Image (tube, grey):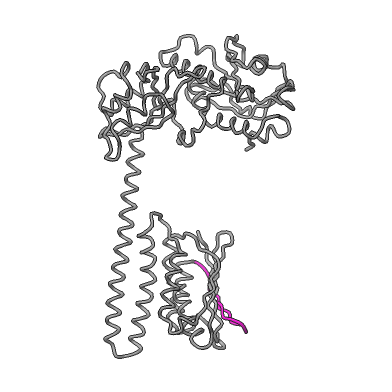
Amino acid sequence: MASIEDYVQGRSSLSPDQIHRLRELVADWQLLSDLSFADLILWVPLRKDFKSWPTGYVAVAHIRPTTAATLFPHDVIGDEISYGARPHIDQALSGAEIVRDTQPEAMGEFMVKEETIPVMVGDQVIGVISRHRNSELMRQPSRLELNYREIAHNLYRMIAEGTFPYPDAGSLFDPAPRVGDGLIRLDVNGVISYASPNSRSAFSRLGWVSEVEGHVLGDVAQSLARVRPDAHEETIALGLTGKALKRVEIENVGGTIDFTVLPLMRSGDRIGAIVMLNNVTELRRRERELVTKDATIREIHHRVKNNLQTVSALLRLQARRIEDPGASAALNEAVRRIASIALVHETLSNSRDSSVAFDDVLDSLVTHALELSPRMNELRIDRTGSFGSLEPRIATPLALVITELIHNALEHGLAQEGLALGIHVSSVASELSVTISDDGVGFPEGFDIATSPNLGLQIVRTLTENELRGTLSLVTDDKETRAVLLFPNV
């Protein structure tokens, strides 16, 4: 989808900062469209500089209302008109004033009233909004419609004065509040002068039994809110005075309501505010469930890790009591494998993410393997690449595979004449490649992993094929022996 820059590049005098201002306007203008029950089109004049008359205009954005039927079944973004074809747009551009008192004109089967609003930055008009409404729906407006329109007029005046969209709003409109969820209008003293039916319903759910109009919004919200232990009692009331752009949330046993406060300005003076309400009860409930679920999962991983360590300790104790060296070695290998699995669960128990930071696991695996080697101080470890975060489904078998390959290199390759162990990780598309190499004696002639009686390598082959859905190749040349593991990271 083309951006504003694409439509005006080389054809307009707008600076990057002015284009950014238009993007901010477009990001927030669903509110304007809904309040005025109108389609909005943003036009940018095509001219070489601000002193020149434009040759025409290009439509760079179009929004439809959710509170009324659209008058434009097809997008007009990218459409161009010549200067003089739409006098109201020309008038808003040249006079830097809102053009309101226009006569309805036929558009298909509708009589449409067009009004135009200059978009100001400093003393320059950088664009014009054309507002299109069905004039037939304007004859007998309800109280809700009258209030919405008056609020819309205030906001359009702020656009023409350069005070809307609000500077430094940041993430205040994420997620963007919707008019239909509930709207309250405040006077300059923070008293509720109008409350939409949905906003009154929201207060009823929180336990307010009387009419809210005529009351100070901050006092009403403060009386309903269940104050959190870390909150000051006056925070809610101060946030809902309408004096500043704020987002406030109140909660009690009846639910949770989010308030977005938008001050209304005229010629630099505050004339009141609007407050958008959003019932976020279900959202907060789900968030709490996720937090509880996350804590439960971490606790399970912690207990699994503790149980594995207990099993490992029992096996280690048993190994010390067995006189048969082969049986004792087999138990110690089992202890090592269990420790690899426990490392993955320990990482998950200490993380708030559902994925495993596998580079930390690999560090622990290498350290643990070296501690078991009698030549620990002589060995050199060369490690390149990074795993990043992996799913537990992949991390657990991968930890076992890497443990076995490192142990095999230490025991059979480096134990005799080699001194260098290499671990190289690379990622291509959605595949991970892990290469573990050593400069030892290598595999004997005719070696085949499929027929090898080595239990560790059989574990590696089985886990690679069945759990990782990957492939394992063992290569020996004059310089080194490499075990290359390739598997999909999806």
Q: Position of residue 126 (x, y in %)?
A: 64, 25
Relative to residue 92, is residue 381 drawn left or right? left
- Who's the residue at 55% across and 70% down the image? 424
Left or right relative to 145: residue 220: left
Image quadrant assignment for residue 404 = bottom left
Magenta residue check for 477 = yes
* Horizontal side of residue 16 vs 47, given as left or right: left
User: x%, y% of residue 2?
Assistant: 64, 37
At horizontal 53% and vertical 25% (from top left) the residue drawn is: 164
Exactly how many numbered labels are in the figure? 0
The picture places residue 280, in percent across and down from the top left corner, at 36, 35
Q: Nearer the viewer, residue 149 or 447?
A: 149
Taking depth in this image into account, of 131 and 393 the one nearest to the observer is 131
Find out whether residue 441 is within the magenta segment: no
Image vertical order of residue 271 relative to residue 295, above or below:
above
Q: Quadrant of residue 72?
A: top right
Pick the front one: 138 or 188 = 188
- Reply above or below: 354 against 442: above
Name the spot of residue 133 as percent of width and height, x first: 55, 17
User: Which of the two residues, 23 or 1, is positioned nearer the viewer here?
Assistant: 23
Name which quarter of the figure residue 109 lies in: top right
Which quadrant: the N terminus?
top right
* Chain part drawn in magenta: 469-482
